[in-house]
């Protein structure tokens, strides 16, 4: 039985929506347009460019694209429940609690166990992610003793496919996160350091995927590029993960893409990371989440992914902005509940 058999997306003819919309229509339009552009330019990306695998029989790729194209019309319309119900079919997400419970039993992280165990039968786990604001140095110091590394020197100029063919001999696949933190790349001069961080900041940016740093009045962005081939382990905390990412400097915050050059430009509050492999890129989601016990409605596009979403149909990750770390992130986002009602929206035919 496939994982999808444990999750459902049910046509909801009378969705019970409550709360105020909090959506930047311009930002939503831009992310939808960027995602649609990627889908049109990368039709052979079978991993992501599809209507969904065993998810919505009513969906086809043309309908997903039509939905994304229609999103920009929201800029000129009153955004309310009546308008959405008139123009879209709603498919309520019933989460895969069976897999969530299996992972909860295996997890060594008490918070993660609690969150997975308590997923309601009709709501998803809504986690939030952010781009990491980096307190960084251009040079290694006793404080800033961990680097964001570019691809190792022996992989420069190789495509992902060429690198995979040579993986047995390449630096990238040889070392764990713990090896890199212990200094192997630096000692052997195997890769170029892009910027130097504290170890705590390194763990955070490896988890979040994007680092943002202000240097000499200029904001610089660093995005995950390629990893060491070790899967993310949902049951472990961030420090115990063996997966390690090499980074590239990029012009803005990026989401999904097959190469660093074709990744989708995304924006806070209107982009989600999730199970792109099974759901298909570009799904338009409506979430209803409690904001300090008051319901809030938010629209966003599935335009990003992450290792935590392998075999995961119980969770979305909501891009919330840029923060230095947990404390400032938490202060601004603690008002949001951990769970949300969620629907996939498809433009009516």
Image (spheres, rainbow, N blue to C red):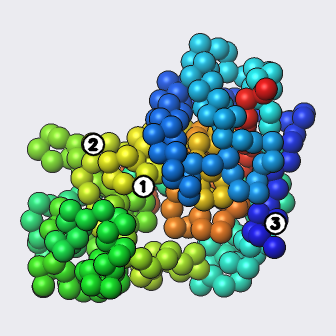
- Measured from the top left, where is residue 308 in percent x and y? 56, 67
Res. 227 visible in picture: yes
Q: CA distance from mark 1 to mark 3?
A: 29 Å
Which residue is under mark 2?
A: 251
Q: Earlier in the sequence, mark 1 or mark 2?
A: 2
Distance Cα–Cα, label 2 vs label 3: 40 Å
The one nearer the camera, 291 or 304, is: 304
Name the quarter where the N terminus is drawn.
bottom right
- Residue plotted at (60% across, 59% down): 277
Residue 8 rendering spot, x and y as whole percentages: 82, 56
The residue sitting at 37% across, 73% down in the picture is 164
Q: Secondary structure at mark 2?
A: loop
User: x and y percent of residue 319 in the render?
Assistant: 50, 47
Q: Assess disc 1: are there few (<14), some (14-19) or many (≥20) residues with their C-alpha within 10 Å of its C-alpha.
A: some
> Residue placed at 52% from the left, 41% from the top?
39
Relative side of 15 to 189, left or right: right
Q: Residue at x 39, y 52 (%)?
A: 131
Q: Position of residue 256 (x, y in %)?
A: 46, 51
* Mark 3 Cα shell of 10 Å, populated few (<14), some (14-19), many (≥20): some
How packed is label 2: few (under 14 Cα within 10 Å), some, or many (20 or more)? few
| Front residue (pair 332, 210) | 210
Q: Which residue is mark 1?
A: 258
Residue wearing tag 3:
6
> If you read the primary sequence from the N terminus, does the residue marked by circle 1 or circle 3 appear first?
3
106 shown above or below 248: below
Q: Which one is in front in this view, the residue at disc 1 or the one at disc 3? A: 1
- Height in image: 232 above or below 121? below
Residue 309's quadrant in the figure? bottom right
Quadrant in the picture for residue 224: bottom left
């Amino acid at each position: 039985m496939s994982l999808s058999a444990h999750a459902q997306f049910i046509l909801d003819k009378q969705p019970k929506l409550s709360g105020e919309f909090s959506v930047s229509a311009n930002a939503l339009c831009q992310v939808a347009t960027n995602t649609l552009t990627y889908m049109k330019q990368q039709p052979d990306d079978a991993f992501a460019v599809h209507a969904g695998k065993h998810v919505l029989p009513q969906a086809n790729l043309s309908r997903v694209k039509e939905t994304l194209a229609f999103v920009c019309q929201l800029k000129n319309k009153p955004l309310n429940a009546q308008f959405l119900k008139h123009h879209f079919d709603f498919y309520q997400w019933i989460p895969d609690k069976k897999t969530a419970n299996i992972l909860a039993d295996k997890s060594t992280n008490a918070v993660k166990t609690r969150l997975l165990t308590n997923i309601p039968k009709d709501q998803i786990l809504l986690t939030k992610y952010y781009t990491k604001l980096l307190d960084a140095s251009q040079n290694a110091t006793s404080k800033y003793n961990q680097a964001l590394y570019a691809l190792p020197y022996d992989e420069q100029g190789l495509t992902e496919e060429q690198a995979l063919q040579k993986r047995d001999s390449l630096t990238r696949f040889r070392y764990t996160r713990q090896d890199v933190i212990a200094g192997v790349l630096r000692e052997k001069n195997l890769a170029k350091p892009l910027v130097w961080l504290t170890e705590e900041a390194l763990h955070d940016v490896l988890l979040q995927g994007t680092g943002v740093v202000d240097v000499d009045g200029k904001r610089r962005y660093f995005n995950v590029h390629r990893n060491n081939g070790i899967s993310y382990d949902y049951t472990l905390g961030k420090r115990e993960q063996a997966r390690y990412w090499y980074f590239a400097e990029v012009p803005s915050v990026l989401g999904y893409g097959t190469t660093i050059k074709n990744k989708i430009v995304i924006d806070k509050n209107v982009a989600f990371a999730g199970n792109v492999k099974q759901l298909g890129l570009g799904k338009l989601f409506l979430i209803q989440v409690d904001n300090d016990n008051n319901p809030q409605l938010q629209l966003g596009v599935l335009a990003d992914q992450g290792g935590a979403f392998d075999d995961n149909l119980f969770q979305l990750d909501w891009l919330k902005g840029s923060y230095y770390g947990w404390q400032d992130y938490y202060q601004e986002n603690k008002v949001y509940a951990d769970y949300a009602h969620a629907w996939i929206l498809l433009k009516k035919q």
